[in-house]
Amino acid sequence: MNEKYKIPSWSFKGNKGEFILEDPHKTSGLYFPLANEAGMMSSITPLLAGDIKTSQNTFLMQPVSSRDLHNSLDSRNFWLNIDEKFIWSATGNSAYQKLMGFKTESEEKVELEAGYLWHKVTRENKVLGVSSEIINFVPVNQDKVELMKVTIKNIGDKKIKFTPTAAVPIYGRSADNIRDHRHVTSLLHRISTNEYGVVINPTLTFDERGHKVNNIVYSVQAVQGDGTSPIGFCPVEEDFVGEGGSLDWPEAIVNNKISFCGKYKTIDGFEAIGAIRFQDCSLEPRESNSYIVIMGINDSGLPIEEYVSSYGELLKFEDELEKNKLYWETKLSSLSFKSSSRDFDMWMKWVEVQPIMRRMYGCSFLPHHDYGRGGRGWRDLWQDCLALLLLEPKQVRELLYNNYGGVRFDGSNATIIGSKPGEFIADRNNISRTWMDHGAWPYLTTKLYIDRSGDLEFLLEKQAYFKDKQCRRSREVDTKWTDEYGRKQKNNDGSIYMGSIIEHMLLQQITAFFNVGENNNIRLEGADWNDGLDMAVEKGESVTFTAFYGSNLMDLSKLLKSIKEKLKIEEIEIALEMTTLFDTLRGRIDYDSVTEKNNLLNSYFDLCIHNVTGEKAMISIDELSSDLERKANWIKEHIRKNEWVKTSDGFEWFNGYYDNDGKPLEGQFKSGIRMTLTGQVFPIMGDIADEEQIEKVILSINKYLKDQKVGGIRLNSNFNEVKLNMGRCFGFAYGHKENGAMFSHMTIMYINALYKRGYVKEGYEILSMIYKHCSDFEKSRILPGIPEYINERGRGMYNYLTGAASWLLLTMVNEVYGIKGSLGDLKIQPKLLMEQFDNNYLASIFTTFRDKKINIVFINERKLEYGSYRIGRATLDGKTIELNLIEDSLVIDKTYIDKLHIDDKHELIINLV
Ligand code: G1P
């Protein structure tokens, strides 16, 4: 690439998130999601590569990993053979055009424009006098189809004549077959042509489910914009590419093959391609012609020609595109921010898209996410709910309720999560893995729900517990469990045990409390949030998640008091077995003794290996609350005192872990400074660190982990060792993924923690760093949004599907704009810096609270900096409201909000003085 070539960056256009990027094809690895709620999931690149699928076993286009995006020739393509002289791919995907793409001043002008959720690439070739505009999207209905409209225009001054051919390779099988029986599974293909295209209906599927009769039909059909059908097909890939040819220089196109396959033919047992030939087209200058390509995965048994009736005309395509835009705009309309930076506000809209994408794609189906078989992990499930609470709160109660059905009686949880809500799949392995952090997240999400809704009754709802072979936190198996038992915990009498949601929450925190290693922190087990810390099962401990559980225990003790006060109840019902775990109620144990803690937990585990009694005990809320408080205070003191490390040059911070030799992970070592960000985040967020400690931690983080090059705070310093007694992440090269990259999720949680504890300037500085890096396209090379991490070269990796997006939304709403709930009341405490207010001294957030749409506008006329302003006056829909200030927050009673009209948009204006 020419040294002087400056890569253009994307820029926003309009106010609906649309952005434009010139020369998108000159950056490798870009991709964009196209999906619908019916389960269609596509990924698409500027050259229209990527893939199309509905599940691990049903890929229409061959599955791609990130490096296939530039290496694989499989792409949606549309070819022109112009005057039998020039071969031109309207998608840019011909060998010749790709070669020319390296030239700085290439002969083609290419531009990507995208919005939620559509993708448009325009390409002009002045030399040939032709341009293309290609729009792809997935319609927002129950059809599993991706639509593509290709418009070819004569932009020269002479008439042009060309032969147009659409060509989309059809893989039509399970992702597993890439390596497992790739060729043999092509023999299953039953290929046919109809009026409009190529249809594959494999006879069987060969994958991990065994050999099964296949009902899925994969199709690529196409029509001209006026509804005219094509003239022929070339459905067998080897005929299309020709001997010695390739998908980016196919013989059928290059030699303008005329012996095409007719309609209603069958050719079985080959790799297939939806190669669809249209009648030759002549265009006078400025004239254009359009073609609509419909790529479908059909399991409904309905005739696939119906897709053509639904989408095969220009007006129908445009209509669906409008519906698509409207659908996504409406979905994303419940939250938006306005600040001094319009670009930042627009970028945040793309962050809003991300949690919805993760709900749809899980963690498996975009090019970087080339692992797993669909679905999400337990941790991700709960964290994605955080964003749902802010974006689509109505669905959340049921979702949370269903998720609690995944908790096991030993405090661990199901780890294989099905695609339907509340579906958990039994783990049949003899020894499976337990992630020690899993029990901590549900509380955090549920607390956010309770705070925003005030729905304390939810906590008393009864839910079952999950049961499979695993018991004692997967250290042993229940040999009596079989599939016939089912996946719900039973009582001795064979009935299903049901316990309240609060019982589930208590169990998760309290079993963790006793599950300590030799240094009296909670055992690391299979790993914590950092999946890469997976080699310290025996002696590893996670101090940082001990802090998280500690803060949950403290919070829960307060929540119990609220239940007592608001629901007017004195006692709650707990499984008889669990009473063992509330040791304060009957002869305390010594929390400094690891043995006493472990013994107590083991005696509890003994009681719930197979069935439970089903008996309940009523426990006084006050006593329960003090039991939790005692435990929380013990953790706080323990971490403050024992887990503080110092270096010889005066830097101090928390030790976050113990390795598999029972030794502290962090501190000053011969090999250098060893520090983790995770180790600092939860002690700060969870009120374990005191102010002096926070300040010292910030200094140490800035010294050892902050790095402009990666646009934020690194996950850890360089340990210069493949630490086999800690985890696989130390095998990764330094600066990548869980070994010292700028891992967005943890950095955003750090920002959240800083804001929460009042370190607003410090938090904002890092937030700005991340945003600036991500929006500096030349460095990050990603489309708008926050990636999972920024690698050593500053490149954004694993776009779209990251828990960082949920946490960023939460941080913006709850902390930066300070719009919180407090048992259903609206509590407002802005933490905006002066520079976030626009030229009119305004900053605002549009959000829903208790189903009411409210635009909350902060006016900072006196140009005061955060820390020197307070809330001086507030009006709601023009009427002054009572200034009920509690600890600097404006609290508006829920009854007041409930009186607001549900269909109106309300305006709350808050003057800062
Ligand atoms: C990913 C996983 C998440 C895990 C994290 C660190 O993060 O999805 O469960 O905690 O790696 O190992 P994400 O992609 O959500 O940012």
Image: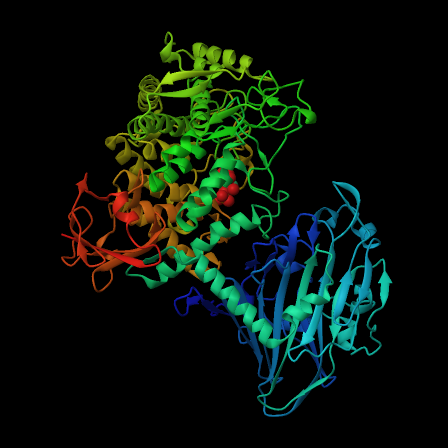
Residue drawn at the location 74% of the way across and 84% of the way down: 84
**Image quarter of residue 396:** top left
**Image quarter of residue 267:** bottom right
For residue 819, above or below residue 46: above
The location of residue 274, given as percent across then percent down, is 74, 66
Instruction: Using the image as rendered, state which of residue 665 and residue 399 is in the foreground.
Output: 399
**Image quarter of residue 244:** bottom right
**Residue 600 seen:** yes
The location of residue 186, given as percent across then percent down, is 81, 54
For residue 344, above or below residue 322: above
The location of residue 547, given as percent across then percent down, is 37, 28
Dividing the image into 4 quarters, which one contains the N terminus?
bottom right
Q: Is residue 896 left or right of residue 327?
A: left
**Residue 740 seen:** no
Q: Is residue 205 left or right of residue 706?
A: right
- Coloring scheme used: rainbow
Instruction: Using the image as rendered, state which of residue 72 and residue 879 is in the foreground.
Output: 879
Q: Is residue 254 left or right of residue 98?
A: right
